[in-house]
Amino acid sequence: MKRTREKGFTLTELMIVCAIVGIVIVVIVGGSLGAANFWCTEEGVLKALQYRNPEVKSVSIERHIIAYSVVYAGVGRSKLLRYTLDTNLLFNYRFGDPEYLDPAVQ
């Protein structure tokens, strides 16, 4: 009985390809998670707000799990701004328009 070679890939070849694809995905996603973690810190949010408004001196973040967070930004001694920080699972962040708040009310 003559054995014919079947066409296709061996299990070893498929495992090697899956390992290479997995490594590439980890490298790509790992690099983007570092950028996303920057937004999780008050320092990161402060730098982003200072890019938009150089007068911002301090921030306080009120985190919400589902859709957005509220960022309170101190501008000078008497002004307080409130921003909404919209987030999604793809790590896209967008600040809403600022609202001026009276610090005496807070």
Image (cartoon, helix red, strand yellow):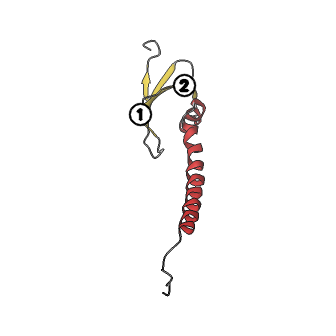
Q: Residue furthest left?
A: 66
- Mark 1 falls on what kind of element? strand
Q: Residue at x 42, y 42 (%)?
A: 88
Q: Residue furthest top?
A: 104
Residue 13 percent coordinates (x, y): 56, 69
Q: Are marks 2 and 1 in contact (CB under 8 Å)?
A: no
Q: Is residue 36 above or below residue 73?
A: below
- Identify residue for label 2: 75
Q: Earlier in the sequence, mark 2 or mark 1?
A: 1
Q: How far apart in space, not on screen, are marks 2 and 1 (Cα)?
A: 22 Å
Q: Which residue is mark 1?
A: 68
- Mark 1 residue crowding within 10 angstroms, few (<14) / some (14–19) / many (20+): some
Q: Residue at x 50, y 21 (%)?
A: 79
**Neighbours of disc 2 within 10 Å: few (<14), some (14-19), many (20+):** some
The disc labelled 2 sits on which kind of residue? Val
> Which of the two discs, 2 and 1, sits closer to the camera?
1
**Residue found at x 51% / y 82%:** 5
Residue 54 horizontal/vertical position (percent): 58, 34
